[in-house]
Image: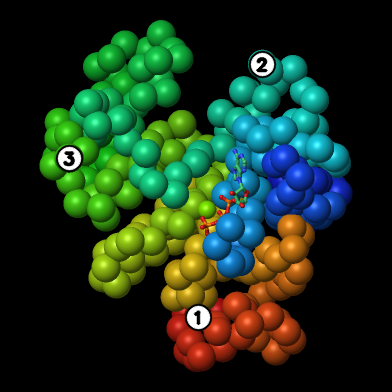
Amino acid sequence: MESIISLRNVSVRFGDTDVLKCLNLDVRQGESLVIVGSSGCGKTVLLKTILGLIPITEGEIYLFGEKINGAPKSKIMELRSRVGMVFQSSALFDSLTVWENVGFYYLNHSDIPDEKIRSLAIEILKDVGMDGFDGFLPEQLSGGMKKRVSIARALISKPEIIFYDEPTTGLDPIMAESITRLIMDMHKKFKTTDITVTHDIKLASLISDRIALIGNGTIEEIGTFQELREKSKSQIIRSFLVMEGTNEKR
Ligand SMILES: Nc1ncnc2c1ncn2[C@@H]1O[C@H](COP(=O)(O)OP(=O)(O)OP(=O)(O)O)[C@@H](O)[C@H]1O
Ligand SMILES: [Mg+2]
């Protein structure tokens, strides 16, 4: 299967600290890859690095088969526009309505008339179960609703890849489950390649084709839920083992 994202010996350094060290990763077209690892190990840094938002000190990154590090800014922007990002905090603009948040990119970077953008936003809001909320302000929404809006914002440009950074963190179990369902439904409907960073074992077990463990700045283990269940030496991965019977995907 073709790799839609490839990282070759990628290192990222902040000051004296190497957060990523010679990291290698291939993400397959159409898969749902889950990234796990202890807090502060570099999961968010990895996502931002793939998007060219954080400079690398060594290595090469290929997105859609094209090298993104060292590419001209216009090329980086073009490749990045094909990736949707759902940030760890929902990162909505408080002063903008729901539809303006969802349509933010088009409102600011295109000549598409506002009314057309609004109808695109309303359409995608329906997909994420937020029909009728287009005129609301973020402060009028619950955490789970904000998460849905941020997923709509990522989906509006019909991205081929979506990054979800801890999409269920801070939500109650029922809301977390409904966001999990939403991620699964959107993956199926839009046939996206998904990378999801999470500490939520249930989410990981339900959505993952493969799980990658980050530790010591690199991918320490990678494999299907079943493979890791059988072979993993990691305490983090082993904690998945107690969740018997939750992997409905297989
Ligand atoms: N812009 C930055 N400048 C300096 N250091 C940074 C920067 N961004 C991240 N770091 C450092 O890189 C390390 C990894 O951060 P990162 O946000 O990727 O962790 P994480 O794995 O996503 O953790 P969490 O599970 O808590 O979200 C941390 O030590 C953090 O302090
Ligand atoms: Mg993070």
Disc 1 Cβ-to-ligand 1 distance below 8 Å: no
Q: Quadrant of the C terminus?
A: bottom right
Q: Residue furthest front?
A: 16
Find disc 2 in the rendering and name its residue: 74
Q: Is residue 225 left or right of residue 180?
A: right
Question: At 44% from the left edge and 13% from the top edge, which residue is drawn?
Answer: 110
Q: Is residue 10 left or right of residue 115?
A: right
Q: Earlier in the sequence, mark 2 or mark 3?
A: 2
Count of numbered tags: 3
Find disc 3 in the rendering and name its residue: 139
Q: Which mark is residue 59?
A: none
Which residue occupies the foreground of this view, 50 or 38?
38
Which residue occupies the foreground of this view, 78 or 169?
169
Find disc 1 in the rendering and name its residue: 247
Question: At 27% from the left edge and 46% from the top edge, which residue is drawn?
Answer: 146
Q: What is the crowding at mark 1: few (fewer than 14 residues within 10 Å), some, or many (at least 20)?
A: some
Q: Position of residue 101 (x, y in %)?
A: 31, 30
Indicate the quadrant where residue 23 lies: bottom right
Measured Cα–Cα span from mark 1 to mark 2: 41 Å
